[in-house]
Image (cartoon, rainbow, N blue to C red):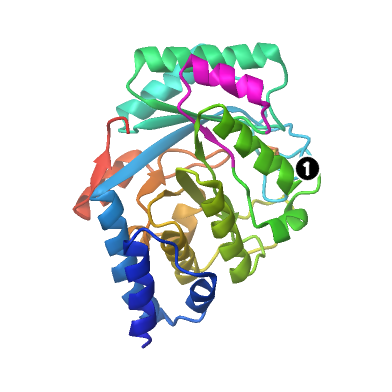
Amino acid sequence: MRTELIDNMVETALKGESISHEQVLQLESLTHEELDYLFVGTGRIREHFKGQDVKICSIVNAKSGRCVEDCSFCAQSSSFQTDSPEYGLMDVDEIVAAAKEAEAFGSNEFSIVVSGTSLDDRKELDRVIEAIKRIKAETQLETCCSLGLMPLKHLEELKEAGLDRCHHNLETAKSHFDKIVTTHTYEDEVNAIQNAKAAGLQVCVGGIFGMGETFEQRAELAFSIRDLETQSFPINFLKPIKGTGLDHLEPMEQYEALRTISLLRLVLPKIDLFVCGGREEVFIDNQERLFSAGANGILGGNYLTTKGQDPKRDIEMIENLGLHPVYTSI
Ligand code: SF4
C-alpha cells in the first residue's frame, strides 16, 4: 500500500493546492484497496473546504432536440436518431413553475438549459431574461443558464436581469475534443466561458467522462478547468444512449468513476464538485461513496433527456450520511 504517496497528495490538497501532474498520473495505478485509503483523505478534503453541506442543483431542459451540432454523446443532436423529446423554448410561466417545483424539493439553485449552438434569436433571449427576472423575484433560488456559445453582450444582459451563473462544459480534454465534436471547436467552448467571466458571471464548467478518453486526458481536462479559475464543476459520466455516436460504449466502472472524482478533488480542492449525469447508472446503490471520493454536490431531479431518481431519495441518502442538503441560496 503506497500510503506515503497518498498522504502527500492529500496534504497538498488540504493546503488548497493542486497536486502535480506527475502525482495525478500515479492515481491511475492505485489498487482498489489503495483507493479506499485515498477516499478517506479526499473525504477529509471535501469536509475541510465544504463542511457537511451537500449542494443540490436542478435543471429544466427548456428547449430540447433539433440541434445542428454533432456532439457524439448527445441525444439532442440532429445528427442522430434517438427517442429524445423535441420541443421549442418553453414559455416563461413553464420555466418559472419548474423552478418553483425544484425549490419545493430543496434545491438551492436552478439552471435553465437549452439545446442548440446558442439561443436562436432576440425573442428567445428576451424570454430567458424574463424568466430569470421572475425566478429572482418569486423564489430564493440562485439562477444559472446553459445556453451554448453566447456572445458577451447577451451574457451581460442576462447578468443585468439577475443571472448569477453560467454553465458551459468543455465536454472533454482539448486533445480528445475532435473525436467527440466536429461542428465547433474546443476554442469556441473556451471563448464562451471567457465571455461569461467577462460579463461578471460565476462560471460552472465541467465535462463528461467515459467517452473513450485516457486517464491522462481526464487529468488534462481537470488542469484546463483549474486554469480557467471557475467556481463549480459538473461531473458527468457517459450514459450511452441508443442512436448516439457513443452508444457502443459501456457506462464507466464504479471504482474508475470514484477514481475520477478523487482526481478532480485533488486537482481542484476548493471547487464545488457536482455529480450529475450518469450518477444512478454508475453508482447504483453505492451513491454515498461519491461524497467520500470528494464530491460535495449533486444534480437533483431529472436530467436533460433522461429521468433521475426521486429527489426525496436523494435527500434521505444525504441525511443518512450525517450530511446536510443545502436548501438555501449560496
Ligand atoms: S451537447 Fe448541446 S450543442 Fe451539443 S448536440 Fe447536444 S444540444 Fe447540441
Which residue is under mark 1? Answer: 184
Write the residue at 76% across / 57% down: 179
**Residue 167 forms part of the magenta stretch:** yes
Q: Position of residue 314 (x, y in %)?
A: 32, 46
Residue 282 image point, x, y percent:
48, 60
Q: Which residue lies furthest to the left in this view?
A: 322
Q: In this view, does 34 lie above or below 247?
A: below
Label 1 SS: loop
Q: Where is residue 176 in the image (x, y as percent from the top left)?
A: 71, 60
Residue closest to the eye, 240 or 16: 16
* Residue at 42% in and 17% down: 135
For the N terminus, the quadrant is: bottom left
- Ligand 1's quadrant is top right
Task: Confirm whether residue 292 shows in the render.
Answer: no
Please give the name of the residue rendered at 76% of the width and 46% of the height, measured from the top-left corner.
185
- Write down the region rendered in magenta: 149-168
Q: Please determine whether, in this image, residue 152 is positioned above or below residue 81.
A: above
Asked which quadrant contains residue 301, the reply is: top left
**Residue at (51, 28) in percent of width and height:** 200
